[in-house]
Image (spheres, rainbow, N blue to C red):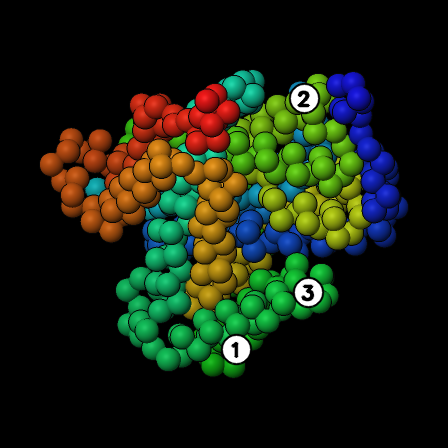
Amino acid sequence: MTQNTKAAPRKNHDLLYSLNDKPGFVPSSFAALQHVLASLVGVITPTLIVGGVLGLGEHVPYMISMALIVSGVGTFIQCRRIGPVGAGMLCLQGTSFAFLTAILSAGMIVKNRGGSPEDILATIFGVCFCAAIIEIFLSRIIHKLQRVITPVVTGTIIILIGIPLIKVAMTDIGGGFGAENFGSLDNLLLAGIVLFSVILLNRSKNPMIRLAAVVIGLLLGMAAAFFMGRLDFSGLSSLPVVAVPIPFKFGFQFDLAAFIPLAILFCVSAMETTGDLTANSTISGEPVTGPVYMNRIRGGVLADGINSMIAATFNSMPSTTFSQNNGVIALTGVASRFVGIYIAAILVIMGLFPIIGGVLQQMPKPVLGGATLIMFGTVAVAGIRVLSHAKLDRRDMMIVAISVGLGIGVSTVPDVLQEFPKTLANILSSPVAMGAVSAILLSLILPEQKHEEDEAEVS
């Protein structure tokens, strides 16, 4: 079989609509709604977490609106492919959990030195804007990046993204930072309703119910909170009717200590996007080798970087392709990239109305914590899964052990770095930065081992 034959797209008989087919309004709208349901919680949750932890309450509805609008714009760019920008496939773009730990660390740096909420947001979005340039550059050399960002490094970093966030989820389950009734039975009951609802719904034989499990779980939690008198919508009347995107509404500031962890994560994000787009190509019956495939990967990673710059410009957090939407393509049999236009329209329309963000902001912390505990735990497990696919030898296990140990260590005992220069301490206090630096350096320094089977072949 020739190389050209390998690169040729295969007909996927499970698909109702292939990549370049144009479904009618009804099937396109139905498929788009399923994509939105599968991704909605992922798009809005990072903003809710950052707003809650850093005390940005009054700005949260606006930021949720911007997250939805930017996700819609990013999805349009990915699916439509504008010049070299975009994968040209049905890819939903949304706010990424991968950056959450580093963004919280960046916000705490500003907050600890007495910065206002506006200063915190100006620094977060300023640093994200600059760091996104890294991914734009990497999109041109993505095929070479795999030599440095190996599965061992990637898996370690993803684990260190998820584990510190579990503390955030557990704090929300208890009632949130500084809650007077922290750990009360009411709080634990609300979190338990969401947690067990998601578990039960996720075991359903109906694939649509499984896709919407988190959304349904949150709605049930909100309903329970309403009957417990935990919801207060009185402040919604003060919100503007329409959210107007304003570039750098909170200003633009830069901090080197906040920049470096995010720059590292944009490298990891480029590799994750490559994996997501490869899975998307497979499900959509498109080639996974050859020039067409590589152009899609470069265009998709380039769009990730540009969309993250757009996100920072319009006051939202970094954006990336969502892997869960590959499952929606497999479920619906609709791989048409033109459905992305409908998805984009739905997200933008939702984002234009701040009342949506205002309602979501009223969600009690235990309700959110019940859902995010699963989501953040899933992130950590995804890192373990990456490592499981790598044939770990003694060298690799040493790299993972040291890097995870250092990363979790500095997050639980930050005072261990108190004698370091302030800027360096701020950088290394991020578990992602500490773990990534350790894993990359050890991978470059420690010589690779010969596997026993290789030695046997030589003898």
Quarter of the figure with residue 4: top right
Q: Are marks 1 and 3 in contact (CB under 8 Å)?
A: no
Give amino acid for label 2.
Asn
Could you say whether the residue bearing mark 2 is in a helix, strand or loop?
helix
Tell me residue 224's x, y (percent): 52, 77
Q: Earlier in the sequence, mark 3 or mark 2?
A: 3
Q: Are marks 3 and 2 in contact (CB under 8 Å)?
A: no
Observer-nearest residue: 373 or 386?
A: 386
Q: Check disc 1 and report the residue beneath it.
A: 224
Could you say whether the residue bearing mark 3 is in a helix, strand or loop?
helix
The image's mark for residue 295 is 2
The vertical placement of 205 against 246, above or below, is below
Front position among marks 1 and 3: 3
Tell me residue 354's x, y (percent): 56, 54
Q: Are marks 1 and 2 in contact (CB under 8 Å)?
A: no
Q: Residue sitting at 47 percent across and 81 percent down? A: 228
Q: Is residue 239 visible?
A: no
Give amino acid for label 3.
Ile
The Cα–Cα distance between marks 1 and 3, rounded to whole angstroms, is 20 Å
Q: Earlier in the sequence, mark 1 or mark 2?
A: 1
Neighbour tally class for label 2: few under 14, some 14-19, many 20 plus, Cα within 10 Å: some
Going by the picture, which residue comes out furthest to the right? Answer: 24
Front position among marks 1 and 2: 2
Tell me residue 233's x, y (percent): 50, 69
Could you say whether the residue bearing mark 1 is in a helix, strand or loop?
helix
Observer-nearest residue: 310 or 241?
A: 310
The Cα–Cα distance between marks 1 and 2, rounded to whole angstroms, is 49 Å
Q: Is residue 209 left or right of residue 48?
A: right
Q: Quadrant of the N terminus?
A: top right
Q: Check disc 3 and report the residue beneath it.
A: 209
